[in-house]
Image (spheres, rainbow, N blue to C red):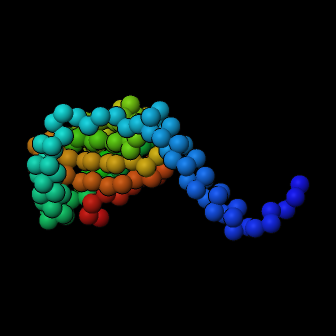
Amino acid sequence: MRKPSNPVLVLVIALPLLAVAGSFVSLALAVTRGDSELPKDYHWEGKDFDRDQQREALAAQRGIGATVGFDARTQRCVVTLHGAAPPTLRLALTHPTQSAADLHRTLQRADGRYSAPCAAPPAAHWWLELADDQAGWLLRARLHGDLSEPAQVGAP
């Protein structure tokens, strides 16, 4: 095969061709793996975000924190709460891309800790929300991995 006599000419032709090929690949991905539609009431969710920020600020003001873990032996979610003691807690563990993997539990207090049946979630980048049963305060955290080690959320 003969070596091109002008390498600049090769770049002038090859770069636009690569850009066109890349755009077709992007189009194919967008068509076959597009995002799902937003909920119809999506524009109303902004009020909830403001209220959640107020609830997080209340938890910080009261010095509320928690240690969240998953006991593989007993197949239970376990929370030790610091700075508050409501009778029940609401735990939401949200997977960033697979809603079928989301976990929502109501944890009951017993012996100073809160627990509920649940298996340890698979390794992922999780969004964790922990709230009291009266929706007064809220703790949020971003957790990574298989959550085999207890995680500290909020004030220590």
Q: Quadrant of residue 67?
A: bottom left
Seen from the viewer's position, the closer of residues 25 and 154 is 25
Q: Is residue 52 above or below residue 74?
A: below
Q: Is residue 151 above or below residue 115?
A: below
Identify the residue shown where x is 80% and y is 66%: 5
The N terminus sits in image quarter: bottom right
Q: Quadrant of residue 82?
A: bottom left
Q: Is residue 121 above or below residue 100?
A: below
User: Is residue 148 among the parts visible in the rendering?
Assistant: no
Q: What is the x, y in percent for residue 121?
A: 44, 39
Q: What is the x, y in percent for residue 96?
A: 38, 44
User: Is residue 39 among the parts visible in the rendering?
Assistant: yes
The C terminus sits in image quarter: bottom left
Seen from the viewer's position, the closer of residues 18 and 152 is 18
Q: What is the x, y in percent for residue 2?
A: 87, 58
Identify the residue shown where x is 48% and y is 50%: 145
Report the side of 21 relative to 134 (left or right): right
